[in-house]
Every structure is written in structure tokens, then in C-alpha cells.
Amino acid sequence: MLRKISILAVVLTLTLFSNRHLAAQISGATNGNPVIATGAAAGTSSPAYIDAYVASIGASGVTATDVCQRIQWVYGSASGLIPVGGSATVDARGFTGSSWSCSVNPFASGSGLTGKTGKLLLGYIDIPAQVTWIVPSHIIIEGLGGNGRGTFANSGANTVIHAYSTFTATNNALIQMGLAGTSAAITFGIQLRDLVVDCNDSSSATTGVLNLNSEEQSLLNDVAIFDCSGIALHVSTNQSNSPGHGAVNSGPYENVNINFSPSGVCSGCSSAIGLQVDGDDSSTSVGRSVRGFDNLTISGNYANCCSSGFGFTPVVIYGVSTALTNSHIEYCAAVCVQIGNNTTYQTYGVRISDVTIGNDNLNYDVEIYNPGATSPPSVGNILIENISHESINTHTIDDAVTSNTVPDNYVGWYWLGIGSSSSTTPAVFTSSNDMTTSSGNPFELRVPGYSDFGNTITKPSGSFKIDHPLDPANQYLYHSFVESPDMMNVYNGSVTTDKHGLATVVLPAYFEALNRDFRYQLTPVGQFAQAMVAQKVNGNRFVIKTSKPGVEVSWQVTGIRHDAYANQHRIPTEEQKPESLRQH
């Protein structure tokens, strides 16, 4: 009996000790700042993690059913939860369902959010935004997923932000990454992850996500954008929108789904743009780039959305360098991807790679727009590769700059260079064997020779590849280029000497005008004989003499170019590597 009492006393002692320890933790904690989660000592508070639902209960001046007011209170100065210069994970996953209102931007305006950074976590919720969400610098919004069809009832376990019927927009956007305007500060590190952004066919929220001024580390990942009658995703490096370079070097924008829901809610689809990436028309904008757009899907419902298909161009890129890769686009009205526009915006360095086009209702998959008679052209250095059309199509590529078209349903690669200062026709090269010019002539590779853009093809190696002449159905034949440290031309042939052992070789009429420093090689064929150059090149001909009459001689003459262009642009045979490439 005594032993049982002793054991019971030990258990009671441990229980009381445990309860006192737990009570100390609870009494020392502050709502929204779990002691265990932050590692803070008992009796202290930490801003590292804030439960927005718990922390904002009963907050002064806040409507209890307004999720955005309650989140804004957490970020604001009134709560004192996040100090200026502090960073916090604001967990708003406690707000669930579709019974909430959202009358304000959830991020406090003015000095209330100055220097406050971190992550906002959103859960299974449908947020009816009445105003634009303007996301500050170094804020990450992360939801539960970017799947679904844009209506909360059908969206599964998603986070949906949709434009309410009384929506009032800033810059026509539902979500704006950073501030905008000439007096706005440049923003960085704004990220949208795992969200559904639903314009809800609003006449005010015509843009789903807008980035005019958020640069490095600003991106989208796993975001679905629905029913926007203007531009679903608009990224711009135009300086007029901001004091810096706009959205330069932002991205990547990955796993983005732009769609019109099959419910028929898309009255503005006839003039919409899925993705627009643009810059400005100034010399200082040259070289600006946006990190690429990968795994982009632009789609909709052909029958229910627009009776004759989409009337818009799903992707428009001009005035900026970027890439669109691993993507699928369908239901385009005439063109799926447009590069360049109808003004003189300088559009260089655009790559469209591994994109499938999924409807047969258009003229071209990709159009390189002709911006007008500019010299050199303001559109160039365009690479298009691995484009496939899933159904019958008229043309895959329309290059309006050079009037070239590629009629194939599949294109391996197509490259448009930059035209010369005296011509608007840049170099063009493609894997397609069927590409023709507007006059029906086959394409050719042209490398213009002018000082602005260079004139030399430089390569580590080179070869030609043709069908093998002995087995053209099953094999290829490769030959390497003949290379020399000189700008050398090679001429050869055969000739038979007369009864006096003499033969005159007539060279092209331009031979001496083009060449200098001649070298000769002579080989008698079929018999032993001596052969010599009896008279060197003069008047574009030279004379061979053999020790016997009637000797066939195989001859070769080489010359070094000395035309005006070659004399001014000699190719160096040795060159120092730049410091950054040495030891490689």
C-alpha cells in the first residue's frame, strides 16, 4: 500500500510540474506569436510568426467579417505586431470559406508598411476584392494552389482572389506587383505563389496581374488567371510607368494558366491578351530583359466562351528581350504569338521554344511583326524552335520583316538576325526545307558586312550534312570545312599539254582583282613526266610546260584575298582571351 502511495505521489508531482510549465508557456505567450514556433523565451513576444485570424479578433476599427481589413490591421502600425524594418510570416489560413468581404488593400498604406517584409499565407478561401491589391516590396503571397476554374465553388482546395461586383481598380489591375508612377520607389522580391486570380469578367479589373515596377526576385509560380477582358498577365519595362526600369530582370514566371471559364463568363474575350511583355521606344531601353515565361498555358472554351473562337492574340512581346518556353496555346483567332508591334519599338533577343499550338482557326502560329520601313529593322535576333501545330494550319511562322513564311506544321528552328544599315533584310536561317520567300525563291543565309553589327561568322568547328549518296534513305554524310589562317581562295582543275608540252589555264576574270600571293601545285596524271609553271599568273591566266607532249596535269592555285573589304577587315589568327574566360 505504501508503495502505491509513493508512485501516486510521484505521478502527481510530475503532473503538477508539467502543468506549471505549460501554464508558464501560455501566460508568457502573446496571441499570434506562438512561443514554441518562434523559440522565444517565456514572457517575451516575437514578430517572426503571426496568426492573423487570432491576432485580429476584436481589433479596434476593423470589421470582423472583412478579411482584408483584419490582415491590414496586422501589418499596420496600430497592432504593433511587426516593427518597422521587421519581417514576419503572417498566417491568414484561419480565414476560410466564401463568407468574407474585402474592402481594402490588405497591405497597410503609407508608413504603416514601410520596411515590413515577409510572407502572407492564405488558405482555402474566396476573397471578393473590392480594390486592387498593391503588393509592397519583399512580400510573398502564398496560397494553397493555382488549380480550378476560377469560381470558388469549383476550385477545389484553392486560394481564390476575385474581382467583386463593385471593384474599383488601380491601373485596371486586380493584383499589382509594386507601386507605379514616376515618384514610386523601385520594388524587389514580390512573389505570387499558388493562387487563383479571377478577373470575373469585370469591366474594371481588366488585368489580372500587373508588374510595372518590381525587379529582381519578383515572380509568379503556379498561378491561374481567369476571365480578364484586357491583359491577363502584363509585365512591362517601360520607364514611363516607374522611376527605374520597370519589371526588368523580374521572373521567371512559371506554371501560369490563363483561361476563360467554360461558364460563358468572358464577354471581353474578343479583345483580350493573355500575356503581354513590353518595353518602351527609346534608345536607353535596348538590352532590357525579363526572365522567361515557362510552362504557360493559354486556353478556354471554344463553344461557350466565344462563338467564333478568341478574337485576340494570346501572347504579345515587344520592346524587351525574353523567352517563352515549354508552353501550350490554343483557340487563337489569327495569330498565337506576336513578336514586335506596329510602331518602331526595338525588339531584339526573343526566344520562343517548345511551344505547341492547339487549334486550326488561325493564319499563323508565330508572327514576326513588321514595324515599318526602318533601317536597320527594329525587330531582330529572334529564335523560334520546336514549334508544333496539333491540327491543320496554313503557316507556322510569318516573318513580315523579311516576307518569309514557314508553312510546316512543325518547325525545328528558325532564326532571324538583324538587317544592315543599307538594307531592311536581315539574315535568316531555318531548319525547314520548305521555307520560301514571297517571290517563291528558296531562302539563303546572308551575313551583312557593315560595322554596326559585325560581318564574320565565328565557329569552333564546321561541316556540311547531306543525304549519303550511297544510302540516302538511311544515312547522312558529313564533311568538315577546309580552314586556313589566311583569307584564302582555292581554284583547281585539269588540263592536257599540246604537242609542244604547253597548256594555258584560264582563270576567272576577277581572279587577280580578288587575289594576291599565288601558290601553285601541279601533278602529272597517267605517266611519269615533269611539270612546271612556265609563266606565272598574268592577265588571269598561267602557262604549264611538261617534259613530254600530251600529258594530263592536275593543277591547283591558291590566292589570298586583297579586295577592299578584306584589306580593311583582316581576321586575326591569334587573340588574347578576355580575363573572364581565361583558364576555360
Image (cartoon, grey):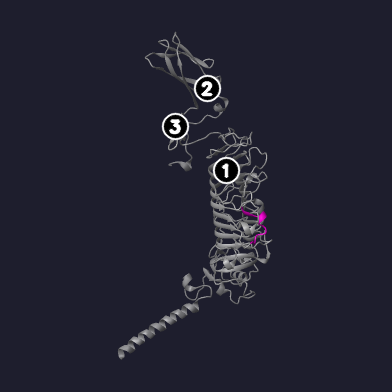
- Residue 382 is marked as 1
The residue segment tinted magenta is 264-275
Q: Crowding near pointer 2: few (<14 within 10 Å), some, many (20+)?
A: some
* Relative to 230, 356 lies left or right: left
Please give the residue where the numbered disc 3 appears in the rendered image: 469
Q: What's the CA distance linking mark 2 and mark 1?
A: 36 Å
The location of residue 72, given as percent across then percent down, is 61, 69
Q: Are marks 2 and 3 in contact (CB under 8 Å)?
A: no
Location of the N terminus (image quadrant): bottom left
Sequence-first tag of 2 and 1: 1
Asked if residue 179 can be seen in this view, the reply is no
Question: Which element carries disc 1, helix, strand or loop?
Answer: strand
Q: Quadrant of the C terminus?
A: top left
Could you say which quadrant of the image residue 147 lies in?
bottom right
Give the CA separation, mark 2 to mark 3. 34 Å
Q: Residues within 10 Å of mark 1 (few under 14, many from 20)?
A: many
